[in-house]
Image (cartoon, helix red, strand yellow):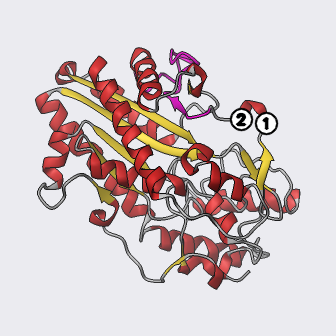
Amino acid sequence: MTASDLDLIPAGTVYTSEQITHYADPDTRTLEQAVVEADVLVSAPHAGAAIPEEVAEFLSPELTRRLQYDFSDVSTAAVVRRWAEIDPRIVAVVNPHPRLVRDPNRPKPSDIRADLTTAIERVRKAGPWQRVDLTGVDAIRPVTFSFFPILQIPETDAEVQRLVEAFDSAAEQGLGVYERTRDELTDLFLAHGLAHGGSFTRLSFHDTMNTTTTREGAVSVPRAEQDRLPAIVALSNRGDHDGEERDPEDPPTMRPEALRDLAAAHREGFESADPAAVLLNQPYLGSQEIRADGAKFRLLAQDAGEASLQLGAVQAEFLREFLLGAVATEILHEPGTEWVTENREHIDALAYACKRSWDAFRDVQ
């Protein structure tokens, strides 16, 4: 498969904040009004799947559209955008670039070239399709989570440098816009909340499939049991399985009792009688976005004005099979090179369930 068979963002495409920010009734409300009337900022850091054409030359020739989409949380994009259309209590920002460019839910490397060089060396040493530990250097991954080589591994330092420069330049056209927009919106919510009180929650919205890919493109290899998501969603605040503090050096980003209320609200909103369908901090604790906001909120807690403003940051990791639906999941379990077609009715139902869940949460706060 060639780059022309993949979904590419045309070279030179530069996104604006307006293009990636979503809220209800934009024809009759300004963004400033939306922020005043909302209490949740939703970010979708991995929702993009299309790849900037500027970096296409560095992609593995074995990359298919299915593997391209599987290496994203693309199922979250339509759900988050639709939820924002129907719910005036949220504002959403959706990253238009894939995590391939750079993962905004990881700390931004101080030296991208050094980290990527280290990651490439680890991958080269392990060999194609072999498990490799990229801990600490996975902001730009040369391989997918099933260890498919998504990038052609450069042979020389000069080629590595050219790759890094291309990725860094492309990132400013979409990913950088997302990060700045996300942070600016957070500051707008905080400024209003500190002045008027109430509550503000930062929600980082993700999905993960409980299976990974084969070389033939079947997304059918079961993850290890400890890595599998519950039937609907895992809600994370860096705490333990009850949302309580797990490590004094890594405090919860949302009050434990609030996280438990949020879990109960999701079981209600998604109409599940199974307590295990929504779990806390299992299998993930939550990553950079909620950690950064949690740290910011703890600093604000020292401000006297915070007493009337309830703050929290939470990561929602939905089961991708749940977001896709049974028919699409069955298709992806078979070998292939293409992704699936989104079911608009299913997306609509999921968006309304998200709205019901957060409405139920507000009712008990």
Q: Is residue 365 visible?
A: no
Q: Residues within 10 Å of mark 1 (few under 14, many from 20)?
A: few
- The residue under the point 60% across, 63% down is 100
Q: Is residue 233 magenta?
A: yes
Quadrant in which residue 259 is drawn: top left
- Residue in front for this viewpoint, 311 or 275: 275
- Residue kind at label 1, given as amino acid type: Ala
Position in image of residue 76 (x %, y %): 49, 51
* Residue span colored magenta: 231-254
- Residue kind at label 2, given as amino acid type: Asp
* In this view, 333 is above or below 339: above
* Quadrant containing the N terminus in the rendered view: bottom right
Give the SS element for disc 2: helix
Q: Is residue 354 visible?
A: yes
Q: Residues within 10 Å of mark 2 (few under 14, many from 20)?
A: some
Q: Which circle marks residue 346 in the picture?
A: none
Position in image of residue 334 (x %, y %): 78, 59
- The residue under the point 82% across, 58% down is 214
Give the SS element for disc 1: loop
Marks 1 and 2: in contact by CB < 8 Å?
yes
Position in image of residue 43 (x %, y %): 40, 48
* Quadrant containing the C terminus in the rendered view: top left
Q: CA distance from mark 2 to mark 1?
A: 5 Å
Q: Is residue 324 magenta?
A: no
Q: Which circle marks residue 224 in the picture?
A: 1
Q: Which circle marks residue 227 in the picture?
A: 2
- The residue under the point 54% across, 80% down is 54
The main secondary structure of the magenta stretch is loop
- Residue in front for this viewpoint, 202 or 113: 202
* In this view, 5 is above or below 272: below
